[in-house]
Image (cartoon, rainbow, N blue to C red):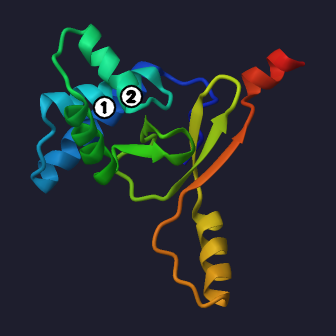
């Protein structure tokens, strides 16, 4: 898996691919990708950054949808629980999964300059934490890895 958030790529293709993966997963598992859930995912994919629930609600309302906070939170819960989006704990926000349809435990790089969030693989990080925890007789049930810093564009702008 490659980091997507800080590199150039065909954004339209990435959106189409992620929506296709979500539709395929829902069809295979008998899940319903309702219009509201789909629209929330489309917004996250289009924005390509972490967004809070109320930011999403503002977008939906601007589009003329009579969305309410519980509706958005239910859509986000569905997207996160099925791996189509991730919650960025540090920001209390959500980002579309860069690798939908793949079983993975990502880590997140958060740019403190522009707010861009990049998803990266974290298998080695997770193994190191679980190994250290096991040495302390602790079993890790859930782990979120987030690192904050500056993306290439923000570092360049600062120079």
Q: Is residue 89 left or right of residue 67?
A: right
Q: Is residue 159 left or right of residue 133?
A: right
Q: Secondary structure at mark 2?
A: helix
Q: Quadrant of residue 20?
A: top left
Q: Quadrant of residue 62?
A: top left
Q: Nearer the viewer, residue 78 or 4?
A: 78
The dot on residue 121 is none
Q: Give the image location of residue 53, x and y in percent.
A: 36, 31
Q: Residue at coordinates 47% horizontally, 67% vertically from top-left?
A: 142
Q: Is residue 75 left or right of residue 59?
A: left
Q: Residue at coordinates 40% horizontally, 19% vertically from top-left?
A: 12
Q: Is residue 123 above or below residue 20?
A: below
Q: Is residue 31 left or right of residue 140?
A: left
Q: Which part of the image, by quadrant, shows the C terminus?
A: top right
The dot on residue 41 is 1
Q: Give the image location of residue 128, x and y in percent.
A: 67, 73
Q: Give the image location of residue 87, x and y in percent.
A: 44, 45
Q: How far apart are labels 2 and 1 at the CA level?
A: 5 Å
The dot on residue 44 is 2
Q: Give the image location of residue 89, x and y in percent.
A: 51, 47
- The number of numbered discs placed on residues in the rendered structure image is 2
Q: Residue at coordinates 38% horizontally, 53% vertically from top-left?
A: 102
Query: Mark 1 packing: few (<14 Cα in 10 Å), some, or many (20+)?
Result: many
Q: Residue at coordinates 75% horizontally, 32% vertically from top-left?
A: 150
Q: Nearer the viewer, residue 21 or 67?
A: 67
Is the residue under label 1 in contact with that under label 2 (CB below 8 Å)? yes
Q: Nearer the viewer, residue 38 or 28?
A: 38
């Amino acid at each position: 898996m490659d980091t997507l958030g800080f590199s150039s790529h065909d954004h339209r293709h990435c959106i189409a691919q992620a929506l296709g993966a979500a539709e395929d997963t829902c069809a295979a598992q008998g899940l319903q990708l309702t219009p509201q859930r789909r629209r929330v995912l489309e917004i996250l994919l289009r924005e390509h950054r972490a967004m809070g629930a109320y930011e999403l609600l503002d977008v939906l309302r601007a589009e003329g949808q009579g969305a309410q906070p519980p509706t958005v939170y239910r859509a986000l819960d569905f997207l996160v629980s099925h791996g189509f989006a991730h919650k960025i704990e540090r920001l209390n926000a959500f980002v579309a999964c860069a690798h939908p349809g793949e079983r993975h435990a990502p880590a997140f790089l958060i740019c403190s300059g522009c707010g861009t969030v990049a998803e990266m693989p974290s298998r080695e990080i997770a193994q190191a934490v679980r190994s250290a925890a096991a040495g302390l007789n602790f079993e890790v049930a859930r782990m979120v890895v987030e690192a904050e810093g500056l993306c290439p564009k923000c570092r360049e702008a600062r120079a």
